[in-house]
Image: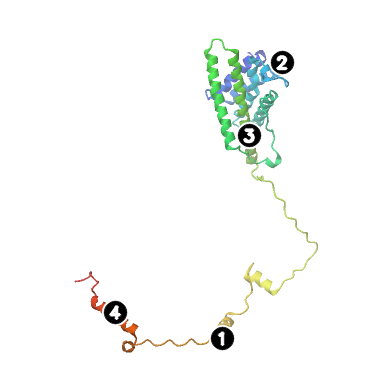
């Protein structure tokens, strides 16, 4: 039976890369054993690469041979396989840490060759332990998404060119591997942020009593040394026992005293003048007033022109 030690780096990488592509496209069943097999092959290839020292800290990307350039993404592939391997909740946290570790290892390698400027930290600060990843601004996310889509189209086109040609040009292969490296840089950065958020959720689900924010400082209170005497008054006792907390004041008189005082104040007020008695019709006719006579005449004319019931056009038998 052939073991990983008997295979070359190219054979190990090609087999694991083919498995990863099929798993990502859901062309094969998502079994844990399949992920583990691909991880073992890539780790064996990683050990052989370390023995050969193919990648250096003081090289430029242009100095790496095209056939060796494709092994750049080996750490990113291992990180992806760890990320999607474990449906088991108990082993999920270990797989997440392994995935983040390999993604960071890949980004460090890319930084050594000037492909990445900043690398996220593996651990969060204590103050941000339960704070989810801060989202980037909208324009930055849109720009990254456009760049990633453009890389995917370019990679698909270059793969078709590599498959159709009888003899693949070295320039096409180099461009394909370079585009894959750039795509995995963005993918690794996105996955690291998502995995860190998942770690916080898993930790919080294990102990939901942990506070999401930092506790505030408690107010210092003076200690009470020895016995003490309660000093109170009659008004305070009434407010606490009868009036309740925050009662504005205690009553100053009884209900009977209130009504006696009200009657006394009303008796002291002067009596209003009597209203004049209304005048009868005869008395009104005797009034010698031009305005009154004119009003009476107008009313008589109105009654002559509008007899009683003239406006009622309905309910007539």
Q: Which residue is mark 2?
A: 52
- Helix, strand or loop for disc 1: helix
Residue sitting at x 71%, y 15%: 52
Of the numbered discs in the image, which one, if any, rests on residue 238? none
Q: Quick one: label 3 or label 2, which is nearer the N terminus?
A: 2
Task: Name the secondary structure under disc 3.
Answer: helix
Q: Quadrant of residue 228?
A: bottom right
Foreground of the two, 270 or 87: 270
Residue bearing mark 1 = 264
The answer to whether mark 4 and mark 3 are in CB contact below 8 A is no
Q: Which mark is residue 298?
A: 4
Marks 1 and 3 in Cβ contact (< 8 Å) = no
Neighbor class of circle 2 (other Cα within 10 Å; few <14, some 14-19, many 20+) is few
Q: Quote the CA–CA distance across marks 1 and 4.
A: 52 Å
State the residue position of label 3. Answer: 193
Q: Is residue 295 above or below residue 236?
A: below
Under circle 4, the secondary element is: helix
Label 4 – label 2 distance at C-alpha: 126 Å
């Amino acid at each position: 039976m052939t073991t990983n030690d008997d295979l070359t780096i190219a054979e190990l990488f090609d087999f694991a890369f083919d498995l990863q592509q099929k798993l990502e496209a859901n062309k094969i069943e998502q079994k844990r054993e399949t992920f583990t097999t691909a991880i073992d092959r890539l780790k064996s290839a990683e050990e052989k690469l370390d023995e050969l020292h193919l990648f250096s800290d003081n090289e430029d990307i242009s100095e790496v041979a095209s056939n060796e350039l494709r092994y750049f993404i080996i750490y990113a592939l291992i990180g992806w396989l760890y990320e999607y391997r474990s449906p088991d909740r108990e082993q999920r946290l270990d797989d997440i840490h392994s995935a983040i570790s390999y993604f960071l290892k890949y980004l460090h390698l890319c930084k050594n060759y000037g492909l990445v400027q900043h690398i996220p930290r593996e651990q969060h600060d204590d103050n941000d332990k339960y704070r989810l990843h801060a989202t980037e601004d909208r324009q930055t996310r849109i720009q990254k998404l456009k760049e990633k889509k453009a890389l995917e189209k370019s990679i698909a086109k270059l793969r078709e060119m590599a498959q159709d040609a009888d003899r693949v040009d070295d320039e096409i292969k180099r461009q394909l591997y370079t585009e894959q490296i750039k795509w995995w840089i963005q993918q690794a950065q996105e996955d690291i942020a998502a995995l860190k958020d998942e770690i916080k959720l898993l930790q919080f689900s294990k102990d939901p009593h942990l506070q999401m924010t930092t506790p505030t400082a408690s107010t210092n209170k003076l200690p009470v040394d020895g016995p003490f005497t309660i000093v109170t008054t009659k008004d305070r006792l009434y407010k606490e026992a009868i009036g309740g907390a925050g009662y504005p004041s205690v009553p100053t008189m009884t209900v009977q005293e209130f009504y006696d005082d009200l009657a006394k104040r009303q008796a002291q007020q002067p009596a209003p003048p009597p209203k004049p008695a209304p005048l009868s019709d005869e008395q009104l006719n005797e009034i010698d007033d031009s305005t009154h006579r004119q009003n009476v005449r107008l009313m008589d004319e109105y009654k002559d022109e509008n007899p009683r019931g003239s406006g009622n056009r309905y309910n007539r038998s």
